[in-house]
Amino acid sequence: MSPHRLMPPYNRLMTEYNLDGAFDEMFMESGEPRAHYSELLKAFLAMPGEEREARKHSADVSFLTEGITFTVYGRDEGTEKIFPYDLLPRIITNTEWQRIEEGLQQRITALNLFLRDVYHEGKILQDGIVPREIVYTCRHFRREMRGLQVPRNIYIAVTGSDLLRLESGEFVVLEDNLRVPSGVSYMLTNRRALKRTLPNLFRKYRVRPIDHYAQALLSTLRSLAPDGRPEPTIVVLTPGPYNSAYFEHTYLARQMGIELVEGRDLLVHNNLVYMRTTDGLRRVDVIYRRVDDDFSDPLAFRADSTLGVAGLLNAYRAGNVSIANAFGTGLADDKALYAYVPAIIRYYLGEDPLLNNVETYLLTDDRQRAHVLANLEKMVVKPVGESGGYGMLVGPQSTAEQRAQFREAIEASPRNFIAQPTLTFSRAPCLFEERIEPRHVDLRPYILYGDQIQIVPGGLTRVALQKGSLVVNSSQGGGSKDTWVLDG
Amino acid sequence: MLSRVADSMYWIGRYLERAENTLRILDVNMNLMLEGSSTGSETRWRRVLRAFSAPAGVDERDSDLTIESLTFDLNNRASIASCVAAARENARQVRDEISSEQWQKLNSLYHRLSGMQTKQQRPMLSDAMQTILDGIYLFQGVTDTTMTHGEGWQFIRTGRFMERAVQTATLLELYYHELYLQRDLLQESAQYLEWVGLLRSCGAFECYCTTYTADLTPERILEFLLLNRKFPHSLWYSVNAIVEALAGIENDSRRTRADELSRRAGRLRAMLSFAQIGEIIEQDAGVYLRQILNQCRMIQELTYRLYISYSIDTTLTM
């Protein structure tokens, strides 16, 4: 690890750019730009301040007109605001991408096989690879899914895995999002905005396209349609306008040209699912479900849910409707199970994982727990069933009081937490008003699993916009940037 | 179109029209308060409250309270603020099915009204009311210019003209009973003011004068508000707009047969098309107006039964 070291002062823009031990996406340790970033850097350094402003403004307008906004309801004018984004793209070479792509294909294939196995024969449990307690104590394990035949045996049609890049430059998987991953609309709209804003750079770089995502999603959903439904009706099921991802739901429905429905638009009769239209009831064949398991069917899951469709699980069980993702997939992105994913890959595929995990301590194990509790200030502790960065303890930034609280909580229910060493993950250049500064980034590629596994090249690069922050979640003040995967 | 969406569209139309009508009626009666007349202001406010089917508990003897309750009081479901809030809530549910301009205009109208919640923040009442009215007109304008004139637009229109027809008929019925039938008991000048009040409540004074000159007779006023085919707030015009909007909806749907609904709507229009004011008054206009109100209710019910809240059994057997 090299100490803080000033970059050669390219010009006023870069005076605040330091390299600190973290992998820098743009600069090598020597302070030279990486080959695939040099054009981008040159272009921005050469750009007069007013032009930068103008381009930033044009991107803002593009976001507004695309409707990638959230409405500030409390505001006087009731105006809409755009989500934070950064104008400098994150660039991934083709070689790097191939590795990621193969690694994710392998990982998702194995996780899907795992779900299929656990909800049927349970061989991996009999063979003692994954302990039964981990599965049966998981909050997202759905007993209702036992023995249920899901279309094409695909449980996880749409997923998004979060990758980090360590000091060595290696990509590792931080977590898998196998329930209802969101953010893909930002991936798509970032690209559109940037194409309009920096057309010349696009011409210089050969960036692999991602615009076909909506089409690929639609064909993935179609491939899961029940047999005998050659022209399936496909819908997006949303919890409604109060959900924070509602914009994405409407965006995807519009991009795919299919209906956006709420639970109250659907009904189940004789195990068939219908939607209520002004033209009478219309049968629904495939549901892209953006409602959590718990709220999807008040008969099967939480009875107090008003967002779901009574009888949905039975219709699913009868094979009359396909639901993506299946219920109970959260089992495989449980943070305690995460520690077993490398073993799961070896078990089902007989291969070594191409993408490594982050080192993870299971707190149910006495020795590991003792180690974690002794070193809490160096650890990141996460509750196993949460996502979105909620309820985490970030050791180095925590107070003694917070650590004491977590210590107590961990000792009370060790199964509910895991711990990981605090990671120094990579930083990428971000454009602020008058300068370029590095910020920590992660990468969430979106994986579609239908007839085949498809990953549109790139994904959503999330940025921790606060200086020094390691938290990239949009719910916690993160932003995003366009991600370019280069061709050849 | 999803039934839920159609439902929301219909109520966006109805609630905003209701807000507009309330606004106009309040404005007229506030003006009349300034004129000395033998119809006591209590009687008049009672009539106003009945026109809005206002909840019990509003004291018509206190005109300030009544006005407050009908404008900014969110606890009164019939107040202008409540109507605008309800319209916006419906629009929010179908945010993606209406144009951005529609959403922006309605949302900013809502926020302007929210900003008037306390008396300190409020401009002069007449200015406040003008602001709100402009906001509603703006929404109606962008609805016609920025939204596809498809099913959704037709549902908004159906709601809007249904509300207008019901409001006009209700007002006419009240005036018929309280003014026309009791015309012998009132001074002529007082009567004059009240009839002008009715015309203004329907935004009809100027149009009436162009048609009949300023010579106000109750029969002509009733004829104008009931049967005129060019004036957009007359009953005939409103019912005709409903018939057309419903026909538009029927054309858009592939399966639904709206025989009964279009028969009812057509018959209501015919009831107005082939009527004569002399006959109506001779045979009791009160009864006639109540029939119209019943028919309107029936048409709304059939619209819902056909497109929105139909029973599952009827459509599964289709």
Image (tube, coloured by chain):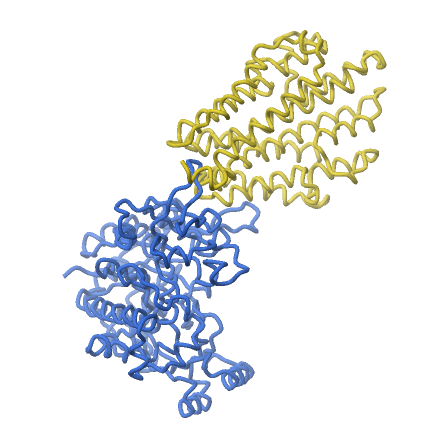
The quarter in which the C terminus of chain B is drawn is top left
Q: Quadrant of residue A451?
A: bottom left
Q: Residue at x 54, y 42 (%)?
A: B90
Q: Chain A is which colour?
A: blue
Query: Looking at the image, can residue B1 be seen?
Result: no
Q: In this rendering, would B83 be left or right of A59? A: right
Measured from the top left, where is residue B138 in percent x and y? Answer: 53, 32
Q: Residue at x 60, y 24 (%)?
A: B295
Q: Farthest residue toward the left?
A: A488
Measured from the top left, where is residue B205 in percent x and y? Answer: 66, 16
Q: Quadrant of residue A149?
A: bottom left
Query: Considering only vertical position in the picture, is A21 above or below B255?
Result: below
Measured from the top left, where is residue A369 in percent x and y? Answer: 43, 88
Query: Looking at the image, can residue B278 be seen?
Result: yes
Q: Residue at x 45, y 64 (%)?
A: A477
Q: In this rendering, would A114 be left or right of B85? A: left
Query: Considering only vertical position in the picture, is A438 above or below B151?
Result: below
Q: In this rendering, would A77 be left or right of A28? A: right
The quarter in which the N terminus of chain B is drawn is top left
Q: Chain B is which colour?
A: yellow
Residue A91 or residue A411, whichever sits in front = A411
Measured from the top left, where is residue B308 in percent x and y? Answer: 49, 38
Q: Residue at x 32, y 50 (%)?
A: A193
Count of labels in the image: 0
Residue B187 or residue B50, whichever sits in front = B50
Residue A165 or residue B55, whichever sits in front = B55
Q: In this rendering, would B214 be left or right of A20? A: right
Query: Considering only vertical position in the picture, is A242 above or below B218?
Result: below
